[in-house]
Image: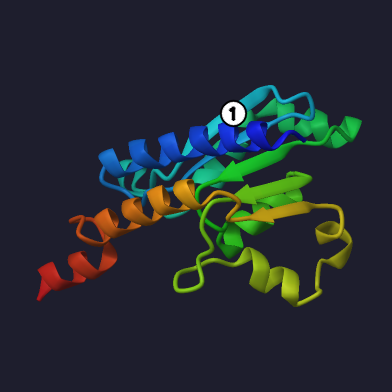
Amino acid sequence: MNVDKDRYFLELAIEEAEAALNEDTYPIGAVIVDDNNNLIAKGRNQVHPHQDATAHAEIDAIRNAGQAILNAKVSRQKFAIYTSLEPCPMCTGGILFANIKKVVWLLNDDLGFGGYRKIKGTNVFDERFNEVELIEEPYADLKNRQMKLMTKWSNNRNNIVNLRSAEK
């Protein structure tokens, strides 16, 4: 794939992350594209707006892809997901079960719930992981943009640390 296309889709993902932060929720965005580089679906974290702990960006994008994901599984079409942060364990499972064959993210999540690399490292789902192309943090400028969103999130009223502080 052309690197410029990877960048383009990561920019769409970070735009979704910015929209999520504007909705007072965790700033993560994701997009799904097919193997012809057609945009299939967008998603963003909507945990707080939807009052749903499973409303993560990658899951939102997979849900929004709907029938296209199911059709791709049957026809063995290769979809890619571009996300602004390393997927958590739940989203990693969703990506594997949706049969997505390429995962690209802007920022590793070593301190949070980043789970993709950890789960892959267990070798439990080797067969599935071996079919997925992985690209981590390919663009420093977009990575920095995501890091700024994360910093803004740390001060947001809906950040769990701030919610707990408000209860005291």
Rendering coords of residue 147 (x, y %): 38, 56
In the image, is residue 128 above or below residue 126?
above
Label 1 neighbour load within 10 Å: few <14, some 14-19, many 20+: many
Q: Nearer the viewer, residue 53 or 35?
A: 35
Asked if residue 69 lies left or right of residue 166, the reply is: right
Residue that mark 1 sits on: 41
Screen quadrant of the C terminus: bottom left
Locate residue 114, reporting x and y percent. 54, 66
Q: Nearer the viewer, residue 93 or 17?
A: 17
Q: Residue at x 49, y 68 (%)?
A: 113
Quarter location, residue 157: bottom left
Residue 132 location, x and y as percent?
80, 52
The residue under the point 57% across, 31% down is: 8
The quarter in which the N terminus is drawn is top right
- Whether residue 40 is visible here, answered yes or no, is yes
Residue at 86%, 59% in the rendered image: 130
**Does residue 63 appear in this view?**
no
Look at label 1 and name its amino acid: Ala
Q: Residue visible at 21% across and 55% down?
A: 156
Q: Is residue 46 left or right of residue 84?
A: left
Given residues 121 and 90, the one toward you in this image is 121
